[in-house]
Image (cartoon, rainbow, N blue to C red):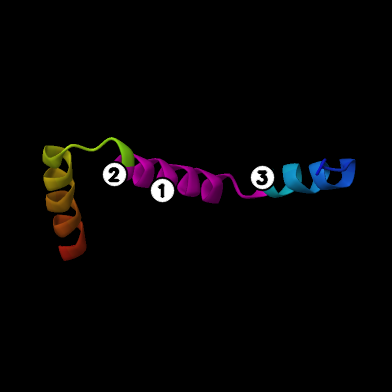
Amino acid sequence: MAETEAQKKATKKWNDANKAHRNYLSSRGAARSFIRNKATEDDLLELRKMIDEKLKE
């Protein structure tokens, strides 16, 4: 379905007002994609260690 001009304008307005949240969502998606599709066992072990340290903070 094609996006109307009003929808495009609303989307741009939301994007402009929510840059930090968009960046957060983009980074989170990239991290999840990396873990699911590209991470090696060594990567996963390193990430587990980093996550455990972050959770202790």
In the displayed orientation, state which residue is furthest to the bottom.
56
Q: Residue at x 18, y 47 (%)?
A: 47
In the rendered structure, the answer to whether residue 27 lies left or right of residue 20 reads left
Q: Earlier in the sequence, mark 3 or mark 1?
A: 3
Q: Report the residue marked by disc 1.
A: 28
Magenta region, residue range: 17-36
- Locate residue 50, reporting x and y percent: 16, 50
Question: Is 40 a magenta residue?
Answer: no
Give the amino acid at mark 1: Arg
Q: CA distance from mark 3 to mark 1?
A: 17 Å
> Main SS of the magenta segment?
helix
**Structural crowding at the residue carrying mark 1, measured as other residues with C-alpha within 10 Å and reported as few (<14), some (14–19) or many (≥20):** few
Disc 2, SS: helix
Q: Earlier in the sequence, mark 3 or mark 2?
A: 3
In the displayed orientation, state which residue is furthest to the right.
5
In the rendered structure, the answer to whether residue 31 lies left or right of residue 12 reads left
Question: Is 23 a magenta residue?
Answer: yes
Disc 1, SS: helix
Instruction: Work out which quarter of the rendered image holds the N terminus and state it.
Output: top right
Q: Residue at x 82, y 40 (%)?
A: 2
- Locate residue 3, reporting x and y percent: 82, 42
**Structural crowding at the residue carrying mark 2, measured as other residues with C-alpha within 10 Å and reported as few (<14), some (14–19) or many (≥20):** some
- Locate residue 21, reporting x and y percent: 53, 51
Give the amino acid at mark 3: Asn
Q: Report the residue marked by disc 3.
A: 15
- Locate residue 25, reporting x and y percent: 49, 49
Q: CA distance from mark 1 to mark 2?
A: 11 Å
